[in-house]
C-alpha cells in the first residue's frame, strides 16, 4: 500500500474510499467518520497487495474477526466482530494493516480556524511512548515536551486526561462501595467491571451482552472530559460550546470508535469531536517542523489540567484496580492503604488476583485482566456464577494502554526478513513499556 494508494476494502462501504497517508510507518485512510456511520466503519484495514497471508494477525485477533480470503490474505469482513484493539496491526510483519480512519486533515483545518477553540485531551500512556517516535528510549516520559508541542501546533488548551482519570477513580470507587453495601443485588450485580477500555466495552457488548449490568456505569476518563470541556470548560473560558473542538489524543484505535458513540453527547452535541493516536500526533509534530527533543517542558492548562497523578496509573494494567480499590478502602475504613502490591495473592500471565482486607468490612477481592482472551475466560466464570470477585479491571491490550494499537510500531517490523528478531523485539517492548 503506497502513500497514494486508493485500494478498496471490498467489505467497506464505498463512501469510505479516499486517499491514504503514511504516518509513523502505518497507512491511514484520511477519513473522519460521523456518528451515523459508526457501525459500518472498518477501523483497521488490510492492503491485499502487502498481505503475505502469514496468518499472524488471525492468531493475534482475540475475537475471530479476521478471516482468510480466497487468495490467502486475511481481512475483517464484518466490523461488528472487530473491537478495534489494533493488535493485528501491531503484529503484522509486513505492515499490511493500516487504519481506516484519520481525523488529521480535519484537526489541521480546525487548528487554522481563528473561530474555533481547539482543546487537546491527552491520555496518560501517550506521554510514555511519544518519545519513541523521536528516537528516545522506550518508556521515556515526555509529558512536558508533548504539552510544548501541542501549543506550537496551535492547540488553544491542553486539558489533561489524568485529571478526568481522577474523577473516574472517585466515581468508579463510589459505585463499587455502593454495590458492596448492596451486596451486588438488583440491577447492580457484583463483580463490577471497569468501563474505561473501549475495546473491552465493545467486546462485552458484542459477545457477553448479558454481563452489561456488571459494567461500571461510569464513562471513560475521556468520555467525562469531553463533556466537561464543553460545559464546565466552556464556562471557565467564556467560549460557547459550539466553538469548542475537542481532540482526544490516545494510545488506542478503539478510542476512535468510542468518540463516535451517540450517547457521548452530554453537552448537547458531540462531546468528542476527533480522536487521534500517538502515531498521528508524532506525524503532526514532525510535519510542523517542531524539534521535539529540544522543546522545554511545559505544563497542561490548569482549568481541567491539574491531577493528583493517580490517573497515570490508568495507562498500565492494574492501574485502575489500584486506584479504585485504594479509594474504596479509604472510604470504607477511614484508613490509608499503604501498599496495595503487597496484598496480591495470586499472579498469572494476563490475570492477577488481589485481595484487600478492609478493616470493619472484610475482604474485598479483585482481579486484573489484560488481553481479551483472558477476559473471555473470566466472563465465562462470571456468567456461570463461579467468579468470586467484587471488582474486575479489564484492558483489551496485553499490558494495558501503554501497548495500545495506536502506539508507535517497531520499525524492524518493516523488514520481513527480520521476522524472528521482530517478534523478539515486540515482546521485549511489551515487557519494557511500563509506567514508573
Ligand atoms: S499478519 Fe499481515 S501479512 Fe500476515 S496475514 Fe495478517 S495482514 Fe497478512
Ligand atoms: S483490531 Fe483487534 S479485534 Fe479487530 S481485527 Fe484487529 S485484532 Fe481483531
Image (tube, rainbow, N blue to C red):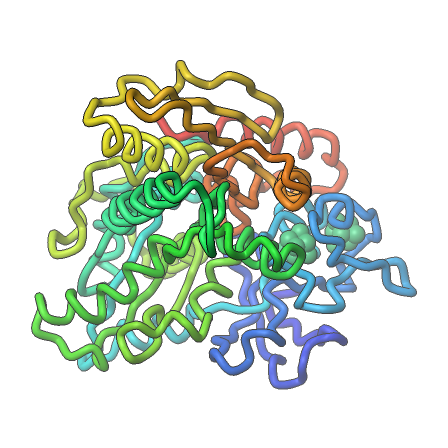
Which is nearer the eye, 13 or 350? Answer: 350
Q: Is residue 100 visible?
A: yes
Residue 313 falls in image quadrant: top left
The spot of residue 206 in percent (x, y) is 64, 61
Q: Residue furthest right?
A: 70
The spot of residue 76 in percent (x, y) is 73, 63
- Quadrant occupied by the N terminus: bottom right
Which is nearer the eye, 142 or 285? Answer: 142
- Quadrant occupied by the C terminus: top left
Q: Residue at x 46, y 39 (%)?
A: 402
The spot of residue 297 in percent (x, y) is 19, 40
Q: Residue at x 56, y 45 (%)?
A: 396
Q: Residue at x 46, y 48 (%)?
A: 185
Which is nearer the eye, 272 or 433? Answer: 272
Q: Residue at x 66, y 28 (%)?
A: 424
Q: Is residue 418 above or below residue 146?
A: above
The spot of residue 282 in percent (x, y) is 40, 52
Compared across the picture, whether 373 is left or right of 182 comes to right
Quarter of the displayed picture in which ligand 2 can be seen: bottom right
Q: Is residue 128 above or below residue 272?
A: above
Which is nearer the eye, 255 or 98? Answer: 255
Compared across the picture, whether 82 is left or right of 140 comes to right
Amino acid at each position: 500500500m503506497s502513500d497514494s494508494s486508493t485500494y478498496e476494502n471490498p467489505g467497506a462501504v464505498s463512501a469510505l474510499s479516499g486517499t491514504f497517508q503514511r504516518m509513523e510507518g502505518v497507512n491511514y485512510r484520511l477519513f473522519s467518520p460521523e456518528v451515523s456511520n459508526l457501525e459500518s466503519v472498518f477501523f483497521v484495514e488490510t492492503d491485499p497487495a502487502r498481505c503475505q497471508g502469514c496468518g499472524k494477525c488471525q492468531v493475534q485477533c482475540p475475537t475471530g474477526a479476521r478471516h482468510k480470503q480466497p487468495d490467502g490474505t486475511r481481512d475483517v469482513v464484518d466490523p461488528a466482530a472487530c473491537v478495534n484493539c489494533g493488535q493485528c496491526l501491531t503484529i503484522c510483519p509486513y505492515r499490511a494493516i493500516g487504519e481506516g480512519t484519520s481525523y488529521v486533515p480535519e484537526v489541521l483545518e480546525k487548528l487554522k480556524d481563528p473561530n474555533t477553540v481547539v482543546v487537546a485531551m491527552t491520555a496518560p500512556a501517550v506521554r510514555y511512548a511519544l518519545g519513541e517516535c523521536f528516537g528516545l528510549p522506550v518508556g521515556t516520559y515526555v509529558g512536558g515536551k508533548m504539552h510544548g508541542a501541542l501549543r506550537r501546533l496551535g492547540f488553544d488548551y491542553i486539558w489533561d486526561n489524568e485529571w478526568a482519570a481522577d474523577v473516574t477513580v472517585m466515581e468508579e470507587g463510589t459505585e463499587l462501595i455502593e454495590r458492596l453495601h448492596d451486596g451486588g443485588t438488583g440491577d447492580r450485580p457484583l463483580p463490577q467491571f471497569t468501563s474505561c477500555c473501549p475495546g473491552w466495552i465493545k467486546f462485552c457488548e458484542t459477545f457477553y451482552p448479558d454481563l452489561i449490568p456488571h459494567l461500571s456505569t461510569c464513562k471513560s476518563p475521556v468520555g467525562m472530559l469531553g463533556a466537561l470541556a464543553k460545559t464546565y470548560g466552556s464556562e471557565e473560558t467564556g467560549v460557547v460550546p459550539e466553538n469548542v473542538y475537542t481532540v482526544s489524543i490516545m494510545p488506542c484505535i478503539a478510542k476512535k470508535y468510542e468518540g463516535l458513540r451517540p450517547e457521548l453527547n452530554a453537552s448537547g452535541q458531540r462531546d468528542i469531536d476527533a480522536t487521534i493516536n500517538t502515531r498521528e500526533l508524532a506525524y503532526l509534530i514532525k510535519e510542523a517542523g517542531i524539534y521535539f527533543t529540544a522543546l522545554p517542558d511545559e505544563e497542561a492548562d490548569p482549568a481541567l489540567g491539574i491531577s493528583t497523578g493517580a490517573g497515570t496509573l490508568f495507562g498500565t494494567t492494574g492501574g485502575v484496580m489500584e486506584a479504585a480499590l485504594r479509594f474504596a478502602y479509604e472510604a470504607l475504613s477511614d484508613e490509608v492503604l499503604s501498599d496495595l502490591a503487597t496484598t496480591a495473592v495470586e499472579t498469572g500471565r494476563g490475570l492477577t488476583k488481589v485481595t484487600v482486607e478492609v478493616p470493619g468490612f472484610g475482604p474485598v477481592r479483585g482481579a486484573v485482566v489484560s488481553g481479551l482472551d483472558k477476559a473471555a475466560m473470566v466472563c465465562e466464570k462470571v456468567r456461570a456464577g463461579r467468579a468470586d470477585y467484587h471488582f474486575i479491571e479489564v484492558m483489551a491490550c496485553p499490558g494495558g494502554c501503554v501497548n495500545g494499537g495506536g502506539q508507535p510500531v517497531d520499525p524492524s517490523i518493516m523488514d520481513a526478513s527480520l521476522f524472528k528478531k521482530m517478534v523478539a523485539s515486540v515482546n521485549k517492548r511489551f515487557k519494557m513499556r511500563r509506567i514508573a
